[in-house]
Image: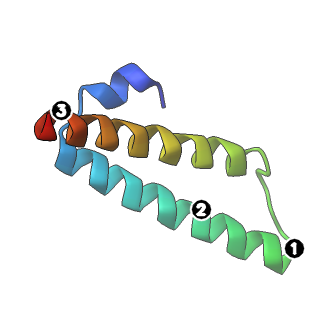
Amino acid sequence: MKIQELRNLSTEELIQKEKELKEELFKLNMQRYSGSVEKPHMFSSVKKDIARIRTLLNEKKEKLNG
């Protein structure tokens, strides 16, 4: 997901998106430990998306606090 797409989302939507990505990462890890990962490239992609969302949430928090 691109940063511009994420910037257009509200704080609540960003938090919901982060929860969804964390669930997806959990499922990928479960596949990893069971030995049947279909898309190993998704690990880094999901982690980067989570980091982008956290960065935007921190930026919005800083704007509110001044």
Front one among 50 and 29: 50
The answer to whether residue 17 is above or below residue 4 is: below
Q: Which mark is residue 25?
A: 2
Which mark is drawn over residue 63? 3
- Give the amino acid at mark 1: Gly
Gap in Å between the C-alphas at discs 2 and 1? 15 Å
Circle 2: residue type? Leu
Image position of 25 (left or right of 53) = right
- The residue under label 1 is 35
**14 or 66: nearer the viewer:** 66
The single residue placed furthest to the top in the displayed view is 4
Q: Quadrant of residue 31?
A: bottom right
How would you rate the neighbour count of disc 2 (Cα within 10 Å): few for under 14, some for 14-19, many for 20 or more?
Answer: some
Label 2, secondary structure: give it: helix
Label 1 CA crowd tier, 10 Å (few <14, some 14–19, many 20+): few
Q: Nearer the viewer, mark 2 or mark 1?
A: 2
- Alpha carbons under labels 1 and 3: distance apart: 44 Å
Residue 65 image position (x, y, % from top left): 14, 41
* Crowding near the residue tagged with mark 3, few <14, some 14–19, many ≥20 C-alpha atoms within 10 Å: few
